[in-house]
Image (tube, rainbow, N blue to C red):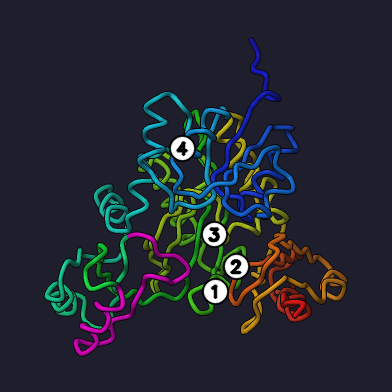
Amino acid sequence: MDKDYLSIRIGIIGGGQLGKMMIEEAKKLSFNITVLDPTPDCPAHSICDKHIVAEFDDKDAIRQLAKECDVVTYEFEHIDADVLNELEQNGYKIYPTASSLRIIQNKYTQKQLLKQDGLPVPDFKSVTSVEDMYKAGEEFSYPYMLKACTGGYDGKGNVLVESADCIQESYAMLGNGKIPLMAEKLVDFCMETSVLACRGLNGEIAVYPVGNNKHINSILHETIVPADITPEASERAMSVAKRVMEVFDGIGMFCVEMFITKDMDVLVNEVAPRPHNSGHYTIEGCVTSQFENHIRAITGLPLGDTSLRSPTVMINLLGTEGKEGKAKVLGLDKALALKGTHVHIYGKSTTKPRRKMGHITVCASIVNEAIITAPKAYSYISVTTED
């Protein structure tokens, strides 16, 4: 008997921009969507079928979400993997799986698994004391990175240890041992990249083109696709991303952030088990967006074509420095007058400095044209406040 796909109910933990963009694709197939998010007017609120207003650590609310849905997914990884594991044990479908989430949530166990399975990663070691940090300096030389194993994002939870004289201060900055830490050898890279990959319920894997990521203050600023690397390096990075999907037995979208060295070697930096900011270019730039493929994957549908339609540049729109309050967007008319430009405003009612409020995508026949147009469009738009 054919499956009635119209009856599928999807639960999403998180109602931010990623959840909203998942819903936009799910609604094209008329799926029913319930969101769990503590913010009553979160971006996903206006387009979901039901909104459970609850904190992300509310286990009873997460259990309620699972009971009301056929499959549960999430838009960020800082959630309780134990309650998701409990739900899986009771027969509920959670994708990506709780087991893959639990490993990925801890940067040290994540790196351990990747290294164990032969994937290329920077040298790293566990840090449980100041003495371990001195040993890391001897082993990796200075500077090296000190990272919180859990909870970090957008550069938060990372400290550059520039010399032995900085060890005490660096250790104190990350909690004086109150949270698990790791040291990682600093990579002399020429490019930060990410590769989006998706795996379906039947094991089918689809891999997206390699993107060149540029950060400002540890927050992603711009993604350029295709990345300006050799075909061999591109093929290697895409092969690594596919292998990561197999290692984690992932279902749905994963983002594999990597370093490309000056010798065009590939090293895995981090893995995110969800659609990712660096994959926003896929909405206009690829045949099938990361959000559509995520919905296809978790509902058992065949994965879509990940081919690049045209060279594409994505730039994040952040809240203006020094401004916090009710959001106000200026300059849309000027930006949208530029050929190939698309603007996404996430619908967050409040803006604050460095908060992700939207993004610009520019598609063009050649990558240099997109590289020139995107910053111009970006210069026209500002996200400020009415105050």
- The mark that comes first in sequence, 1 or 2, is 1
Amino acid type indicated by mark 3: Val
Q: CA distance from mark 3 to mark 2?
A: 10 Å
Label 3 sits on residue? 210
Marks 4 and 3 in Cβ contact (< 8 Å): no
Q: Position of residue 232 (x, y in %)?
A: 47, 60
Tell me which amino acid carries mark 4: Asp
Q: Position of residue 2 (x, y in %)?
A: 65, 14
Numbered range of the magenta stretch: 150-174
Choose the circle earlier in sequence order: 4 or 3.
Answer: 4
Q: Which residue is mark 1?
A: 214
Question: Which element carries disc 2, helix, strand or loop?
Answer: strand
For the residues labelled 1 and 2, the Cα–Cα distance comes to: 6 Å
SS at mark 1? strand
The residue singled out by tag 4 in the image is 60
Three-letter amino acid code at disc 1? Lys
**Foreground: 29 or 320?**
320
Instruction: Decide which of tag 1 and tag 4 comes sooner along the chain.
Output: 4
**Point 52% across, 68% down: residue:** 229
Tell me if I can see residue 313 in this picture: no
In the rendered image, residue 244, in percent from the top left (x then y), is placed at 40, 48
Residue 154 among those drawn in magenta:
yes
x then y, percent, for residue 154: 48, 69
Dot 4 lies on which element? helix
Q: Is residue 167 above or below residue 291?
A: below
Residue 223's label in the rendered image is 2
Who's the residue at 63% across and 9% down the image? Answer: 1
Separation (CA) of disc 4 from disc 3: 40 Å
Would residue 50 appear left or right of 256 to someone viewing this image? right
